[in-house]
Image (cartoon, rainbow, N blue to C red):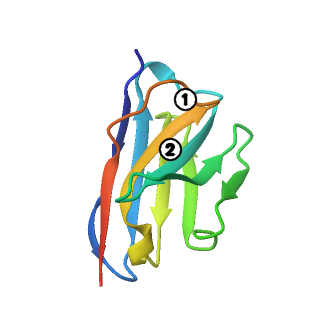
């Protein structure tokens, strides 16, 4: 089974920044659209951003203008640059290819302190 690995989370103060990374085993992201999601403390998972296979970027309204999704084709890695972090941005962040398969990675925890 493909392994998804998210990393880069941590504790940051309000207004701070983090850059998350996402990689998959076996070149699984090649040519695919990749999405970021986050799960809050009530275990509600919401879509955050997508980088489409053609490079187009899509963002959820709460993060638009603050987050940037990008990818490195050479390493088959997708990034999520998160700026001006707010308490509502806290949660476990996951990435996955689209359409969504039936597996997820472990996610990476983002904590925003005020």
Residue farthest to the top, as pictured: 1
Residue 84 showing in the rendered view: yes
Residue 16 image offset from top left, x and y in percent: 37, 78
Q: Which residue is mark 1?
A: 29
> Residue drawn at (46%, 79%), measured in percent from left and top?
84
**Residue 22 located left or right of residue 63:** left
Sort mark 2 into few (<14), some (14-19) or many (20+) by Cα contacts within 10 Å.
many
Q: Secondary structure at mark 2?
A: strand
Sort mark 1 into few (<14), some (14-19) or many (20+) by Cα contacts within 10 Å.
many
Residue 112, relative to residue 104: is it above or below? below
Q: Secondary structure at mark 1?
A: loop
Residue 39, relative to residue 35: is it above or below? below
Residue farthest to the front, as pictured: 42
Residue 39 image offset from top left, x and y in percent: 42, 53
> Residue drawn at (48%, 42%), measured in percent from left and top?
95
Label annotation for residue 78: 2
Residue 104, relative to residue 89: is it above or below? above
The quadrant of the rendering that contains the N terminus is top left
**Residue 58 located left or right of residue 14:** right
Label annotation for residue 61: none
Residue 8 showing in the rendered view: no
Who comes first in sequence, dot 2 or dot 1? 1
**Residue 31 located left or right of residue 77:** right
The quadrant of the rendering that contains the C terminus is bottom left
Do the residues bearing badges 2 and 1 touch, measured as CB atoms within 8 Å?
yes
Picture quadrant of residue 34: top right
> Residue drawn at (40%, 23%), measured in percent from left and top?
25
**Residue 72 located left or right of residue 98:** left
Residue 52 image offset from top left, x and y in percent: 69, 42
Residue 42 image offset from top left, x and y in percent: 38, 57
């Amino acid at each position: 089974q493909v392994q998804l690995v998210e990393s880069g989370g941590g504790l940051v103060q309000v207004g701070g920044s983090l850059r998350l990374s996402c990689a998959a085993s076996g070149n699984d992201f090649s040519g695919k659209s990749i999405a970021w999601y986050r799960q809050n403390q009530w275990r509600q998972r919401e879509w955050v951003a997508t980088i489409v296979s053609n490079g187009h970027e899509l963002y959820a309204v709460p993060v638009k203008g603050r987050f940037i999704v990008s990818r490195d084709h050479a390493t088959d890695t997708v990034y999520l640059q998160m700026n001006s972090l707010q308490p509502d941005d806290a949660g476990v962040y996951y990435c996955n290819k689209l359409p969504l398969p039936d597996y997820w990675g472990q996610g990476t925890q983002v904590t925003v302190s005020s």
